[in-house]
Amino acid sequence: MVATHRITAGTAIAAVCAASLAGCSTGTDAGQGVPGPPKVKPAAPAPQNVVRLIGDGSTAYTGAQPHLPRPERLKPGQKPPQFVVFSWDGAGEDSQKLFSHFRAVSKANNATMTYFLSGVYMLPNHKRDLYRPPQHSPGRSDIGFNDEEGIADTVKQLRLAWLEGNEIGTHFNGHFCGSDGGVGEWSVEEWKDEITQAKKFVKSWKTNAGMAKTTPLPFDYDKELIGARTPCLEGQKNFVKAARDLGFRYDSSGVNTQLWPTKKEGLWDLSLQLVPFPGHSYEQLTMDYNFMVNQSGTDTQGDPAKHDFWGDQMRDGLLKGFHRAYDGNRAPLIIGNHFESWNGGTYMRAVEDVVEAVCNKPDVRCVSFRQLADWLDAQDPATLKKLRTLGVGEAPKEGWASFLSGRPAPAPKGVPGRRR
């Protein structure tokens, strides 16, 4: 992944604003210059934003993440919101500028997303030997490494994405699939080593890329990182065991139907889902790559005359899955993507169309996996168990008010939604 553009002065100014977390406003107060009533002194001064560098300053503690909604328990008889999660595997900014584009799409449509960062995108090619992949020689990666320009651009997008309320997860490092040392063959301990290295590259990009004066990422990655999706959806069994031991809260590496989530090995199983595939009798996984494989095979630039049709097919399939849940059991819809221009970028268009079509509907919340996990953790387990009795697309026959009319158990102390 090689970027072909450089940071501008405007970018540097934006970075300083982001680092301070105080905001850079050019607006003025209404009635400026006109005498008004005396200002009332606040009862206590507002706390000052604190930036505490971590390690070499690649990351920093800057306080609680902005723009995270407070999860609340469902009230008796309340219909659940329709959650939709858009997520991106191997997130990084290159010359296509798809990361920055979808940040803008999110902001314009009241959405937040999850960006699964590949750790090697924070490691320059000339330092590739620092990566010691399990069952492979040092410096090996099936998706390459980055250069200083690409790292700088990716850091900028990660910083802004987090400040806007999005989540930064991990897609690990070398993206090894298949039977020749692929992730499906890794042990629990090898997964732990891979996760440790992914964190290390995020926490030391300044040193590795020689960017000591660049603004840090505004989060502690050891605390920020709570979930992932494995390469090619392989190796889930041992990864989940490793992730549980390391304090992760969810995994999105499997294949599910559109039912309410449950936990697996102590982690929320927020895997990709099967939705209708227009024109076919079988269902399709909610990921751009899988639509492509079932349309043009492994040819990433198939017949140009079919590009529009293929994009429409993905868009319509995702929308059918959305409406099946929205009008049915309200199970969260989980969608996965890549920042790629396969088949002329038709899948990027399809995803953008879906964001615009669903994220502004009543009762819809387009959120990150972190926000969905927070909401699930805040619910009465008995309520979630009852929601899981609804089949795919099945709305309660007696209506939501009756279906969830039972009084939920009181929330444990400290859980959002608990009454004082």
Image (cartoon, helix red, strand yellow):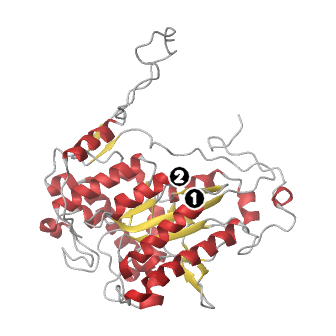
The x and y percentages for residue 56 are 21, 47
At horizontal 52% and vertical 9% (from top left) the residue drawn is: 37
At horizontal 31% and vertical 84% (from top left) the residue drawn is: 181
Is 291 positioned to the left or the right of 398 in the image?
Answer: left
Residue underneath mark 1: 359
Can residue 57 be seen in the rendering of this structure?
no
Is label 2 in contact with label 1 (beta carbons under 8 Å)?
yes
Q: Callout 2 environment at 10 Å: few (<14), some (14 to 19), or many (20+)?
A: some
Q: Quadrant of the N terminus?
A: bottom left
User: 327 or 51, which is in the foreground?
Assistant: 327
SS class, disc 2: loop
Residue underneath mark 2: 110
At horizontal 28% and vertical 80% (from top left) the residue drawn is: 135
Q: Quadrant of the C terminus?
A: top right
At horizontal 76% and vertical 70% (from top left) the residue drawn is: 389
Q: Looking at the image, tell me whether mark 2 or mark 1 is earlier in sequence order.
A: 2
Which mark identifies residue 9? none
Measure how far apart labels 2 and 1 are at the Cα level. Answer: 7 Å
Q: Callout 1 environment at 10 Å: few (<14), some (14 to 19), or many (20+)?
A: many
Can residue 323 be seen in the rendering of this structure?
yes
User: 368 or 301, which is in the foreground?
Assistant: 301
User: 262 or 332, which is in the foreground?
Assistant: 332
The x and y percentages for residue 219 are 36, 46
The x and y percentages for residue 245 are 46, 62
Amino acid type at circle 2 is Asn
User: From what the image shows, is residue 420 above or below residue 267?
Assistant: above
